[in-house]
Amino acid sequence: MDDSEEDELSDEEIERRRQMLREKVLNHKEDEEVEVLDKEEEGHSPDESASESSEYEEYSDSEEEAGPRLKPVFVRKKDRVTVMEKEREAVRQKQAEIEAKKMAEERRKYTLK
């Protein structure tokens, strides 16, 4: 019987110690949060906080740019398309569309006759 009473006491004592440790940890965390907030409020003027936010924005921009990059691929000179060629091709396509419209209009007129 003495062994069971000692076990019960030790269980109760262990539980009591655990509860005390939990309270200490919670109090310690709360104290740290209060200290950090106090330091932030005392150490910063409005100008400093604005500069820090811009630094953060610059950092976030660089993260977006550092996203997944494509692997460079070699393209032979004869297979390359330059800006000038792209513009020429766009002009050709516009001219082709205009000519197609004219031809369609002529066919329509011819059909109506």
Image (spheres, rainbow, N blue to C red):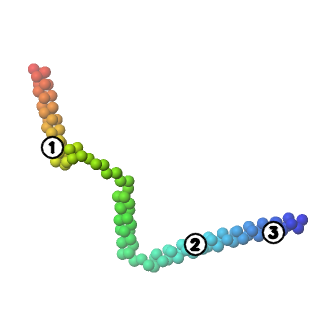
**In front: 111, or 10?**
10
| Residue contact between numbered discs 3 and 1, judged by CB atoms under 8 Å | no
Give the mark nearest the N terminus, 3 or 1.
3
Q: Residue at x 10, y 20 (%)?
A: 113
Assign a secondary structure to mark 3. Answer: helix
**In front: 89, or 29?**
89
Assign a secondary structure to mark 1. Answer: helix
- Say which mark, if any, is on residue 9: 3
Spatial CA distance of label 3 from label 1 is: 93 Å
Residue 98 against residue 2 in the figure, above or below: above
Q: Where is residue 25 in the image (x, y as percent from the top left)?
A: 63, 71
Q: Where is residue 10 in the image (x, y as percent from the top left)?
A: 79, 68
| Mark 2 Cα shell of 10 Å, populated few (<14), some (14-19), many (≥20) | few
- Say which mark, if any, is on residue 88: 1
Give the mark nearest the N terminus, 1 or 2.
2
Image check: 95 left or right of 80?
left
- Say which mark, if any, is on residue 30: 2
